[in-house]
Image (tube, rainbow, N blue to C red):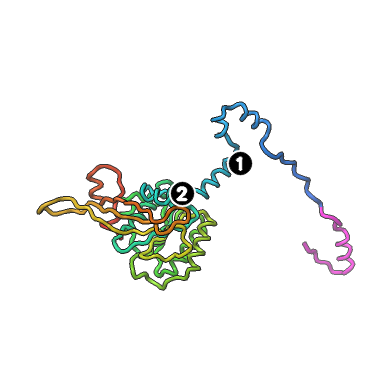
Amino acid sequence: MAAPARRLNTQVNFLRKLPQRPILVPDLPPVEPGERDEVRRLREGLEAAVRSKVMSATELVRALAKQHRAGFLPTTLEPLDALLGGGLPRGKVVELAGRRSGGRFSIVLAALAAATSAGEAAVLVDLGDHLDPQIAEANGVDLRRLLWIRPEKMKDAVHAVEMIAATGFQLVILDAGLHPIRGRRVAEASWVRLARTAEAQGTAMLISTPYPMTGTASEIVLNAQRVRPKWLGSGKSPRVLAGMTIDVTVNKHRHLKEGRSARLEFMTLEAASGTGCRVNTVAGLLGY
């Protein structure tokens, strides 16, 4: 802090009055390593089965942080979660590729519904602009926990994913829509930045594209194919679409065996309401 003075000798005298050494704050009390004697005696008095479950607040915070980083975000599609090894891995990029009417958007809605119903905040970067909020809500998506972004080009969509993932959202989905994709194809370095952002924030990131695009940045690459519709009615009576089955194959997995496949079954909202049970429903008719 400076103080003005009209004469030089006044400035010198003022500076001489300052302490030669800074005043240090008192030392903090020493912290005892490990657990306290009271906690140690309490644990020793418990049974072995109960003792392993008792932890301090610091140990609980560390355990939750470790579980948060190394865990998975289930999609509630049991065959798909088993194929992924437990669900969408947190901190990793999963790419889901499939052609038109391959059921990709139905899988996207299932992941959004699973995350938002569990209390997680989710983001959908919808490049194809195919989300219908009413259908999404009917499929179990909590719209209050969903951030919907509608970019115009692929480059803008990738930038939006990178910026929004850095804010701490636990599920970020980029849906590129149908072929041809609007905008030029982005460089592979952009996907690498997305992978680094997801790893730094512990975000489960799902990229839904009509063809593989992420390259080496993705942890898992899935391929949705062989869609089979199911119909209600027979003979000359009008047939009504009841649902569809989708075959999903693992084209790339850094920790599990590749080439494995699983079959997902979806029902239309009309057929699901007629059965009176909770099942996975199809987005619209066949989605894409």
Left or right of residue 2: residue 190: left
**Residue located farthest toward the left when viewing the structure as drawn:** 236
**Which is more toward the observer, 49 or 276?**
49
**Which residue corresponds to mark 2?**
72
Locate residue 248, reporting x and y percent.
Answer: 34, 55
Identify the image quadrant of residue 186: bottom left
The answer to whether residue 148 is visible is no
**Which is more toward the observer, 47 or 146?**
47
Left or right of residue 236: residue 165: right
**Which residue corresponds to mark 1?**
58
**Which is more toward the observer, 44 or 279?**
44
Q: Which residue is drawn at 34% across and 51% down?
A: 262
Identify the image quadrant of residue 15: bottom right
Left or right of residue 23: residue 93: left
Secondary element at image label 2: strand
Q: Which residue is drawn at 80% across and 64% down?
A: 3
The residue range painted magenta reads 1-22
- Mark 1 residue crowding within 10 angstroms, few (<14) / some (14–19) / many (20+): few
Locate residue 106, reporting x and y percent.
Answer: 33, 55
Q: Quadrant of the C terminus?
A: bottom left
Vertical position of residue 234 compared to residue 130: above or below: above
Closer to the eye: label 2 or 1: 2
Locate residue 108, reporting x and y percent.
Answer: 37, 56
